[in-house]
Amino acid sequence: MKKIELSLEPTNGYINSFTRNTVKGWWELEVGLPKTWVYDENNKIGCEIIFENEVGKLIKIFPKKTDIVIDDLVAFVEIIINTNQKIAEKEKQFTDKMQEMKGTLEKEAKKFYQELDDLKEKSFKNLNENFAKGLDKPKTPRKPRTPRQSSIMPETQKKLESPNE
């Protein structure tokens, strides 16, 4: 690879064209970006949307000051690409983590519902068997109640028993 091709390699597939603005005396780039990608201009380099549809957008990147050269514009495009690739990587990590957590949660739920079903089956079966066994046992007669002894004094007891005396 030659120098220019080597320096433009990281931006392959994104830079659409280089245009020389002869009025202002600087280079401008047209860059195609996916619709979800983020970018922002700064005080030295500007961005302007030329065309946008459901797939992506074509933006013009241009210097705001005369001391910005084409190398700076290409480096700015590389920053946009690298930033959005990092964002995509983070999103993928998050999605993978969520899928992993979803799988773990599904396993836990399956285990919980299995235990719950087993508990329902076994508990009812055991209670039912215990109840049936209880019906088969001969009933033992209860011990008769013993009368309580009165805590009233004997003199008061006699008066209560014969009020007319």
Image: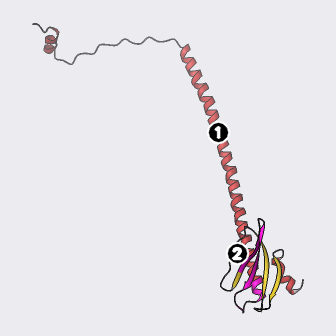
Residue at the disc numbered 1: 113
Task: Based on the picture, tell me whether residue 56 belongs to the magenta stretch.
Answer: yes
User: What is the x, y in percent for residue 156?
Assistant: 14, 15
Say which residue appears at 70% left-offset and 68% top-offset: 87
Split into 4 quadrants, where in the image is the N terminus? bottom right
- Asked whether 144 or 48 is in front, the reply is 48
Q: Nearer the viewer, mark 1 or mark 2?
A: 2
The quarter holding residue 131 reads: top right
| Badge number at residue 39 | 2
Judged from the image, the secondary structure of the residue bearing numbered disc 2 is loop
Q: Residue at x 71, y 73 (%)?
A: 83
Label 2 Cα neighbours within 10 Å, binned few <14 / some 14-19 / many ≥20: some
Q: Is residue 38 left or right of residue 150?
A: right
Question: Which of the numbered marks, if any, corresponds to residue 4?
Answer: none
- In the rendered image, residue 159, in percent from the top left (x then y), is placed at 13, 11
Instruction: Identify which amino acid the numbered label 2 is placed on.
Output: Tyr
Residue at 51% in and 11% down: 138
Front one among 13 and 144: 13
Closer to the chain start, of discs 1 and 2, is 2
Q: Amino acid at mark 1?
A: Tyr
State the quadrant of the C terminus.
Answer: top left
Q: Position of residue 99 (x, y in %)?
A: 70, 54
Q: Which residues are magenta?
A: 47-73
